[in-house]
Image (tube, rainbow, N blue to C red):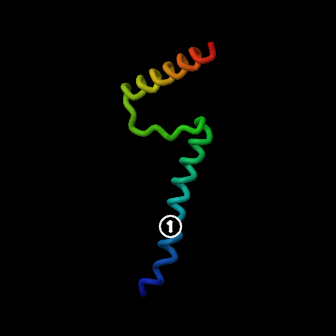
Amino acid sequence: MAWYEAMPPLVIITAALGAMGSLQALVHRAFNDGKNKKVQQDHFNHLMDKRDERIKEEEANATSS
């Protein structure tokens, strides 16, 4: 078997794996208000996210008042 005979299955498998990963990220972003997927976050990162949301809300309330 020559190397060019193995290329179509390799391309198909690579494209399928890439499509699955991209589709998963797009679906997650669509259902999560446009935010990216949060990977390997610990308790400190979650606390910082809550703090950032609180600060944004305070700024929005200050500018609207």
Q: Which residue is mark 1?
A: 13
Front-lying residue, 50 or 13 = 50
Height in image: 17 above or below 29?
Answer: below
Which quarter shows the N terminus? bottom left
Q: Residue at x 50, y 74 (%)?
A: 9
Residue 33, x across and y down, in percent: 60, 35
Question: Outermost residue, bottom direction?
Answer: 2
The residue furthest top is 65
Which element type, helix, strand or loop, lies under badge 1?
A: helix
- For the residue pair 42 and 53, the one nearer the viewer reads as 53
On the image, the x and y values in percent for residue 5 come to 48, 83
Q: How many marks?
A: 1
Residue depicted at 55% across the width and 58% down the height: 19
State whether residue 53 is above or below residue 12: above
Mark 1: amino acid: Ile
Mark 1 burial class by Cα count in 10 Å: few <14, some 14-19, many 20+ = few
Tell me which residue sits at (53%, 65%) in the image.
15
The residue nearer to you, when weighing 22 against 16, is 22
Based on the displayed image, in which of its 4 quarters is residue 32 positioned?
Answer: top right
Q: Quadrant of the C terminus?
A: top right
Residue name at image x 50 percent, y 60 percent: 17
Q: Position of residue 36 (x, y in %)?
A: 51, 40
